[in-house]
Image (spheres, helix red, strand yellow):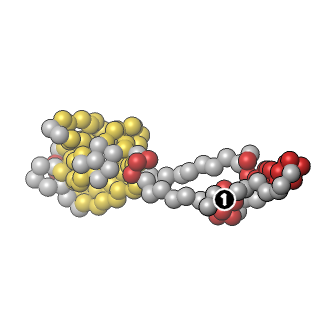
Amino acid sequence: MERKFIKGDTVEDNIDSVDLILQSWAPRLGNCVTGIIPPVPILHYQKYPDEEGVIFGGVIPFKGKISDAFFAIGKYAKKPLYLKIRILYKGIQSGTTLECDKPFQSYHSEILIEAGSIIKVSVEPIDSAEQFYIGILAHADVEHAQKEQQLIAGLSLLTGEK
């Protein structure tokens, strides 16, 4: 059975029905909906580098980008030290090297990553510091985000907007 939205037997009744529908939709027609996908924080602490100088390593399980990296170094033995951020995907390596001479360093970039990319952060010289605190912000592409349908009126209730 076909569902009819327009009610009435006459043209005037049909127009009145359409008018009622438009009036009920009118408050929502001008609303703009913005979806927010927060970054994924990757946090790590390493007291000492391993024998190759590695202080962090992991696999990124989604396609996207790394936008920011933050490093806090507890104890310096030698300054400056160099932090190497490396991304390895299907045999291709990319990345950057940062010179660190302060207890806290931040780095902003747009490093593209693929699902299955290996990220590795290492320090040179190996004996230059200890107590490494690492924070990385990774942004998953929309295709990896959980999708949820909401009516605009429902979103307005969630955000406290009228």
**Residue lying furthest left in this view?**
51
- The quadrant in which the N terminus is found is bottom right
x, y percent for residue 135 = 36, 54
Q: Residues within 10 Å of mark 1 (few under 14, many from 20)?
A: few
- Residue drawn at the location 12% of the way across and 49% of the way down: 52
Q: Residue at x 18, y 51 (%)?
A: 54
At 79% from the left edge and 57% from the top edge, which residue is drawn?
7
Where is residue 151? Give x, y as percent: 64, 58
Q: Nearer the viewer, residue 148 or 41?
A: 148
- Residue 73 seen from this side: no
- The quarter of the picture where residue 107 lies is top left
Q: How many marks?
A: 1
> Residue 153: x and y, percent?
69, 60
Q: Position of residue 132 (x, y in %)?
A: 28, 56
Amino acid type of the residue that numbered disc 1 sits on in the rendered structure: Arg
Residue nearer the viewer, 106 or 148: 148
Furthest-right residue in view?
12
Q: Horizontally, is 125 left or right of 157 in the view?
A: left
Q: Is residue 5 above or below residue 121?
A: below
Quadrant assignment for the C terminus: bottom right
* Secondary structure of the residue carrying numbered label 1: loop
Disc 1 target residue: 3
Picture quadrant where residue 97 is located = top left
Q: Residue at x 72, y 56 (%)?
A: 5
Q: Is residue 59 left or right of residue 161?
A: left
Residue 37 lies left or right of residue 73; in this view the side is right
Left or right of residue 106, residue 34 in this image: right
Decide if residue 22 is in sight here.
yes
**Residue toward you, 78 or 107:** 107
